[in-house]
Image (cartoon, rainbow, N blue to C red):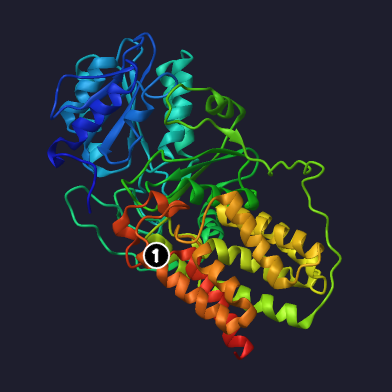
């Protein structure tokens, strides 16, 4: 798998230097490459308690991305998924710890515990006041004697960091951290494992399954379960976390494990909000990632008023999402004039049958059209048309099927609301113009021809430009001879687009010619499939 890295052995150092270069001078590192990789605040006042965390890299933005006012004073970075050395941790302690002392925040992994623990002993021997806390928030394996430390660690960074920033003493900061650790719970779920640079990706999770409770280093989870959508995935996670919440103010930290898209994360948060477990949310955002893992984790913490205030305290680091109340979506009324006039429903068997054939054809062709569009666009033509077809199919009983003029206008209104992208606008114009022509006495055929003229005028596309018009125009020209003639003409027009290697309209105009050669335009193909379905079902 190709990745944007140079040499594997310099990956972490170059990533740290990239972070520093973008920090505006807020961050610096100790001059200890390659073995000592410590990021620290340049504005640090050693009169305050220092907070130091870290561990293996690959969890970015944790931990170096959270070095700054109100959170960490320094982060000690190891290689990817490898604990930093004792010397590296000790260097970090000595660099930032003043008379107020420091708190080490360590995730519960053997390497981290040993290296941070020994470094703490050495620092104490040198006269430094050092406390250490170990975070063990993972509840995936309830009988494990040493639960892992995962994204719940960030609650400790934020709450202890706020207290230290406000001048709290070491004992107060450490006690606050231990209190959080005793109550925080986390669990993750993923559709795929992570990719370690320089190593082949482990193909452990089969298609149709999701792994519950896997670790942030890609360790296997507690079980693989059937994947049945975002809501079910979130509910499974929350079922594991619910026993750890006693009610009251509960904060959920929703963490992207690496490659889950923002769109997916928002859908997951919709599921979280519907359940009602949490009153506040941090995220969704990538905070404690596992390289490119396609998954998410949720951490919950029942908070006191003091802790809630600490979590609300703003910090300037761009990687940290500020906490927000979790609320029901707010809705405002549609402005007057935006809702179309609802037509009077009427029934006509022949029209109902035609529209059913059209919608079924588009639904059946969804995957085929998406695959075709992926070669010349963004792969969503089938889904866009299918979404509109589903909405139209469900609205047939409400349409004025027996009134040609009103039906054309109703189809235009329906498609303008349910069909995304430019296709929805184009077809709304098409049917709107057909409705206007029908109101003037035009037949169905002539009304559709007028609709075609209008979309050519508005959109600028003509036959030969590699759009749906290449199939629609010849189909309408041949329609007076019957639906079979129209289907043959549409197919010829659609197949002809495979030889048009320079599009003059639509998204294909931005695609290299080699991507277009020998591939039909998906819009034209959709038109041909619709006419062919009508011809077959009508018996012509």
- Residue at left offset 22%, top offset 37%: 114
Report whether 355 appears left or right of 143. right
Comparing 517 with 266, the one in front is 517
In this rendering, is residue 359 above or below 49?
below
Can you give x and y, in whole percent of width and height, for residue 352 in the image?
A: 73, 78
In this rendering, is residue 276 above or below 379?
above
- Residue at left offset 43%, top offset 52%: 504
User: Hey, which quadrant is residue 438 in on the image?
Assistant: bottom right
In this rendering, is residue 58 above or below 346?
above
Comparing 41 with 486, the one in front is 486
Quadrant of image for the C terminus? bottom right
Tag 1: Cα neighbours inside 10 Å, few (<14), some, or many (≥20)?
some
User: Hey, which quadrant is residue 337 in on the image?
Assistant: top right
Quadrant of image for the N terminus? bottom left
Comparing 461 with 24, the one in front is 461
Report whether 67 appears left or right of 347. left
Residue positioned most to the bottom:
539
Q: Is residue 47 visible?
A: yes
Can you give x and y, in whole percent of width and height, for residue 519 in the image?
A: 36, 67
Total numbered badges shown on the rendered structure: 1
Can you give x and y, in whole percent of width and height, for residue 122 in the image?
A: 19, 23
Q: Is residue 220 visible?
A: no
In this rendering, is residue 9 above or below 39?
below
Report whether 228 appears left or right of 68. right
Can you give x and y, in whole percent of width and height, for residue 335 in the image?
A: 79, 41
Question: For the residue labelled by badge 1, is the local secondary structure a helix, a strand or a loop?
Answer: strand
Residue positioned most to the right:
344
- Pointer 1: what residue? 223
Report whether 140 appears left or right of 131. right
- Residue at left offset 70%, top offset 68%: 446
């Amino acid at each position: 798998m190709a990745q944007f890295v140079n040499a594997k052995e310099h990956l972490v150092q170059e990533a740290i230097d990239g972070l520093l270069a973008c920090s505006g001078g807020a961050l610096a590192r100790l001059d200890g490459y390659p073995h000592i990789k410590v990021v620290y605040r340049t504005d640090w006042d050693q009169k305050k308690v220092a907070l130091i965390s870290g561990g293996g890299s690959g969890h970015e933005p944790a931990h170096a991305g959270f070095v700054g006012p109100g959170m960490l004073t320094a982060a000690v970075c190891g290689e990817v998924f490898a604990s930093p050395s004792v010397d590296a941790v000790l260097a970090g302690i000595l660099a930032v710890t003043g008379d107020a002392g420091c708190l080490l925040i360590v995730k519960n992994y053997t390497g981290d515990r040993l290296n941070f623990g020994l470094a703490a002993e050495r620092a104490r021997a040198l006269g430094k006041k050092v406390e250490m806390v170990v975070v063990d928030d993972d509840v995936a394996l309830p009988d494990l004697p040493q639960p892992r430390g995962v994204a719940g660690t960030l609650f400790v960074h934020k709450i202890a960091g706020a207290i230290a920033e406000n001048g709290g003493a070491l004992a107060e900061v450490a006690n606050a951290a231990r209190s959080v650790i005793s109550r925080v719970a986390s669990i993750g779920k993923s559709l795929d494992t992570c990719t370690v640079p320089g190593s082949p990706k482990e193909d452990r999770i089969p298609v149709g399954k999701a792994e519950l409770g896997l670790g942030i280093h890609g360790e296997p989870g507690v079980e693989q379960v059937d994947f049945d959508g975002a809501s079910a995935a979130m509910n499974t996670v929350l079922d594991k976390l619910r026993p750890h919440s006693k009610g009251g103010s509960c904060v959920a930290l929703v963490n992207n494990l690496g490659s889950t898209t923002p769109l997916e994360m928002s859908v997951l948060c919709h599921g979280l909000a519907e359940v009602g477990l949490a009153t506040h949310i941090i995220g969704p955002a990538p905070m404690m990632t596992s390289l490119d893992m396609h998954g998410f984790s949720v951490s919950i913490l029942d908070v006191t008023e003091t802790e809630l205030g600490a979590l609300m305290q703003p910090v300037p680091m761009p990687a940290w999402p500020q906490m927000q109340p979790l609320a029901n979506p707010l809705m405002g009324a549609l402005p007057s004039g935006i809702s179309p006039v609802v037509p009077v429903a009427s029934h006509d068997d022949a029209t109902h049958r035609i529209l059913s054939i059209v919608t079924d054809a588009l639904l059946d062709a969804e995957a085929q059209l998406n695959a075709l569009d992926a070669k010349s666009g963004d792969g969503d033509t089938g889904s866009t048309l299918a979404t509109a077809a589903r909405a139209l199919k469900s609205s047939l009983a409400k349409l004025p099927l027996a009134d040609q003029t009103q039906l054309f206008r109703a189809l235009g209104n329906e498609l303008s609301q349910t069909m995304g992208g430019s296709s929805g606008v184009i077809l709304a114009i098409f049917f709107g113009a057909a409705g206007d022509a029908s109101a003037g006495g035009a037949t169905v055929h002539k009304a559709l021809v007028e609709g075609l003229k209008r979309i050519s005028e508005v959109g600028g596309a003509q036959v030969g430009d590699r759009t749906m018009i290449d199939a629609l125009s010849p189909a309408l020209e041949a329609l007076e001879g019957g639906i079979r003639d129209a289907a043959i003409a549409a197919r010829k027009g659609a197949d002809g687009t495979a030889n048009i290697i320079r599009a003059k309209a639509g998204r294909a105009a931005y695609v290299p010619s080699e991507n277009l050669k020998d591939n039909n335009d998906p819009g034209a193909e959709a038109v041909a499939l619709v006419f062919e379905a009508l011809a077959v079902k009508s018996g012509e």
